[in-house]
Amino acid sequence: MPIFTLTTDLGKDTHLLAKAKMRLLAALPTATIIDVAHHITPFSIDEAAYMMRTCVDDFEQGTIHLISVDVDFKKYPNLLACVYKGQIFITADNGLLTLFAPADETVYYKLPYEEMPEGNFFPLKHALVPAAIAIAQNGIEKVGKRIDHVLEKLLEQPLESKDKLRGHILYVNNYNNAITNITRTMFDNVRAGRNFEVVLNYFDSINSISEHYSDVEEGESLCFFNEDGLLEIAVNRAEASQLLGLEKGKRVTVEFFDSNPSSSAAKTPKTGSLL
């Protein structure tokens, strides 16, 4: 029996998740269900794609992922499954799958689903779960029809130059840390051993990579590369997004140089202290 995962924008404090899980367990009593995330910003397929992209390598082949974010069958009438890295991902044809699964490594299937009762706004239970059950029982080839064309969307990538990286905030987590789209590989390639500043706003910047929160005093800002290799900005024992104004989508610039910027009259000194 495969593992099933759920990723939704329903929020954690809702009975709807229990209803969806019980429909799945009624058909497959020995199924294992893992919650990936349910606090996705409503309709934010980029956040859902971030979750999938950063955890796909932790799941075994055959895992079936149900992603109920911006599933609106009037707007996006097709229900899709894609096979990527030996795993199956089910959601609407809303562009989400193309944000994390490269086209040359992915096979797409159009899945059947019954028309939901009038006034029903719960596609996770009435469309995605039945599709997942059918795939688990019969296999993707018998349930779905292969298709070549799906709605494609693109994620904005960081801009690289000789002395700068310009990225943006992908996601603000439960600690109110800001996770950027700047990877360790990008950072190291452009840095080339030089000094740097992560410019957060006119007053605040960070010029070192931390290994632990306690590398700085409480109330001080820090940055580090997280579990997924992305640059993450935090404040020790406080909320970076609130104190530094780091909301989703905000630009983050990393500047690289050969000398300490504070010694240059052209630079305005910045501080990482918040309290």
Image: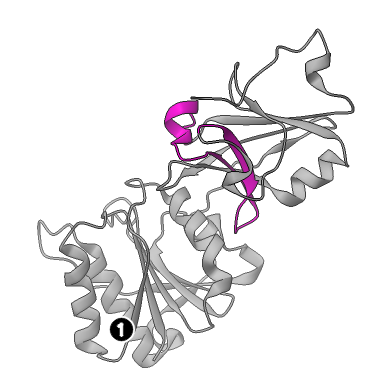
Q: Above or below — where is 268 with respect to 43?
A: above
**Label tally:** 1
Residue 83: x and y in percent read 52, 75
Residue shown at 32% from the left, 59% from the top? 77
Q: Position of residue 254 (x, y in %)?
A: 71, 32
Colour mode of the rendering = one colour
Q: Quadrant of residue 272?
A: top right
Label 1 residue SS: helix
The answer, for residue 245, to whether it is visible in the render is: no
Q: Height in image: 243 above or below 42? A: above
Whether residue 205 sits left or right of residue 121 in the image: it is right
Residue 239 in magenta stretch: yes
Q: Position of residue 118 (x, y in %)?
A: 10, 59
Looking at the picture, does residue 190 appear above or below residue 29?
above
In reply to whether residue 175 is colored magenta, the answer given is: no
Identity of the amino acid at label 1?
A: Ile
Q: Which residue does the image show at 63% across and 21% down from the upper left? A: 271
Q: Looking at the image, which residue is at 27% across and 89% down? A: 28
Question: In this orientation, does residue 5 appear?
Answer: yes
Query: Relative to 207, does residue 204 appear above or below in the rendering?
Result: above
Tell me which residue sits at (48%, 25%) in the image: 275
Residue 139 is situated, as x and y percent measured from the top left of the image, at: 42, 89
Q: Nearer the viewer, residue 99 or 142?
A: 99
Nearest the eye: 123 or 142: 123
Q: In the orientation shown, which residue stands out farthest toward the left?
A: 118
Q: Quadrant of the N terminus?
A: bottom left
Dividing the picture into quarters, in which one does residue 148 lie? bottom right
The local crowd at label 1, few if under 14, some if 14 to 19, many if 20 or more residues have their Cα within 10 Å, is some
Task: Give the residue number, with chain letter if any, for mark 1.
Answer: 133
Quarter residue 86 falls in: bottom right
> Would you say 184 lies left or right of 162 here?
left
Magenta-highlighted residues: 219-248
